[in-house]
Amino acid sequence: MKLCLKYRINPTEEQEGCLDKLGFYATKLYNTDNYMRREQWDKTGKIPNWYEQKKLLRENHWYKLLPSQTAQAVIKNLQDNYVSWFVLRKTDNDANPPMFRRKDKPSPLTFYQQFSIVNGRITIIMSRKFRTENGINEISFDVGVWRDIKGVPKMCNIIRQGNKWMAHIVYEVPERKLKKYPNTMGVDLGIINLITTADTHGNTKTYSGRQALSIQHYFNKEIAKVQGKSMKQQKKKRTKSTSRMHRHKSRQINQLIHTATKRTIDDAIKHKVGTIVIGDIKNIRKDKHWRKKDSQKLHSWSFAKLTSQLTYKAMLAGIRVVKVGERDTSKTCSVCGVIKKSNRKHRGLYRCKCGNQMNADINGARNILKKYLRESKDSRSIGSVAEPLIWRCSNVVPS
Ligand SMILES: [Zn+2]
């Protein structure tokens, strides 16, 4: 299993100069490659593939100044951009081929084998040409806060974010032996409640999503304000401050997602859950009730985040994760099984003629759980529901 951790690094002024140089070389290489591809496209209507380009550019000045795999990653990145353009232009006549990068914008740097991590320090190794031209063999960084992980570092991405430098490191982590715990937990993902759980022991819990929505709302308003003023201002200034706000927004929402998923897994361990069943989100738009465009935007990306964080945290804890289709799970009564859309009342209440009356998301989580038990021919009943516990993750406030 792969795991990505983000570290803030603190390069010295001299190191920062080196990183900017490398980023500049990467931008130059990207543009050189793009120029060749466009020429080829004009001439033949075809684009060379990654391997051909790699061969053609091997002796290129910028290529040789970069660590070889970093250079290859630049070419691969452009290749991927071309592939998405090819897909896009089938349906969109106005789709543009990948643009050239601005010279003053250093590209992110990807390292595969030419980096190492020893005692919480990240070291990157320079190419031979860079060494002879600059007299620098390698750069070793101070890392802000080091989080140790038992895994093999596979890839390191160094990215400049304004005045900050970040290293995103992908580790290969051994998968844990699965625990043979008896209980199973259904998980429903949503807007008003980020995560709702119901397990075979009758435990339920809800993690409110209101905080995430209010962060979203707050930042969108602030960004709109800045954009409104921007007509009179310089373009550069505007993009800088709005992109900072976008970053703050996603950092705060990520923090909430992190807290909610961690607590969910802690609960699962506490209640001896061996299997977690997540409603598959593929058809989420058809099945869920959307009220505002706002919430839709939040969820297109945060659902994926919730699912992937739950999955890897569960795996680290030795808990199995399975997915079941979400179809009808919000409309179905989790007690008598009747499917009726109008049973979903206002304020997230589900009420059925059979007497069942409970929080609609808990009803959904129970249905996800039931669906899995039915599909896996497990005859356990899921018990009745006690008053649900509601957690509000309010450790983050908009600043
Ligand atoms: Zn019913």
Image: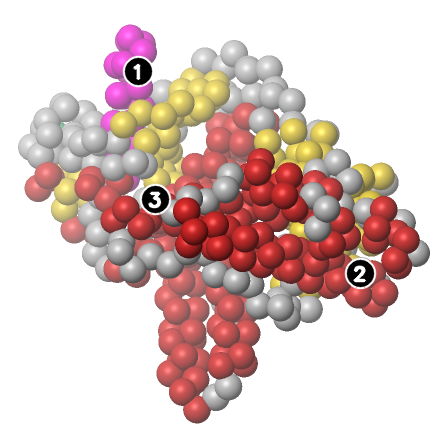
Q: Earlier in the sequence, mark 1 or mark 2?
A: 2
Which stretch is magenta? 361-383
Residue 93 position by quadrant: bottom left
Q: Name the residue under label 2.
A: 18
Is there any visible trace of residue 49 in the rendered image?
yes
Q: Which amino acid does label 2 sit on?
A: Cys
Where is 28 relative to 325, above or below?
A: below
Is there any visible trace of residue 210 in the rendered image?
no
Q: Which amino acid does label 1 sit on?
A: Leu
Q: Mark 1 points at which residue?
A: 373
- Neighbour class for label 3 at 10 Å: few (<14), some, many (≥20)? few
Q: Which amino acid does label 3 sit on?
A: Val
Q: Name the residue under label 3.
A: 87
- Element type at marker 3? helix
- Element type at marker 2? helix
- Element type at marker 1? helix
- Neighbour class for label 2 at 10 Å: few (<14), some, many (≥20)? some
Horizontal relation, residue 361 to residue 338: left or right: right
Q: How far apart are marks 3 and 1 (CA)?
A: 39 Å
Residue 307 in the image: state x and y as whole percent: 43, 37
| Quarter containing the N terminus | top right
Residue 31 in the image: state x and y as whole percent: 58, 59
